[in-house]
Image (cartoon, rainbow, N blue to C red):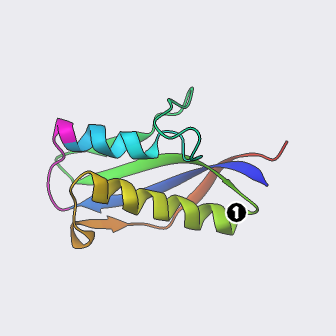
Amino acid sequence: MGSYVITVPGTVSRPMDGTARRRLLAVVRGADPDRVGEEVPDLDVLTLDEPAGTFVLRLEVDAPDHTAAGAAATDLARRAFTSAGYQEDAVSLGTPAVTGIDVG
């Protein structure tokens, strides 16, 4: 098992208000069930370009390998957007990429 930082890019079909952003961040901060809602130091979780409707989520997940980490991050991103009030067809997720690994 290792901790992976996974970057998930994507687009949203409508702007994100403050309430939706707070709900999304509450889900993704601390993917470990014991740490949900926790601030991950030095990790800028969400970058959002409102006019273009594009975003990048940087998620920390624990997984046995990079493939499982990508799948876990994608699932977490979907749950976060659902919690923020976005229907599945309102969010398009891109291919997740590993941007950091801690296997120690």
SS label for mark 1:
helix
Horizontal arrangement in the rendering, residue 94 relative to residue 89 (left or right): right
What secondary structure prevails in the magenta region? loop
From the viewer's perspective, is residue 71 above or below residue 22? below
Count of numbered labels shown in the rendering: 1
Q: Residue shown at 38%/40% (left/top)?
A: 26
Give the residues in magenta: 13-19
Find residue 45 and report its horizontal and vertical position in percent.
45, 39
From the viewer's perspective, is residue 40 above or below residue 101? above
Horizontal arrangement in the rendering, residue 30 relative to residue 88 (left or right): right
Indicate the quadrant containing the C terminus: top left, top right, bottom left or bottom right: top right
The residue lying furthest to the top in this view is 41
Indicate the quadrant containing the N terminus: top left, top right, bottom left or bottom right: bottom right
Horizontal arrangement in the rendering, residue 12 relative to residue 4 (left or right): left
- Residues packed near mark 1 inside 10 Å, few (<14), some (14 to 19) or many (20 plus): some
Quarter of the image for residue 53 reads bottom left
Residue marked by disc 1: 66
Q: Amino acid at mark 1?
A: His
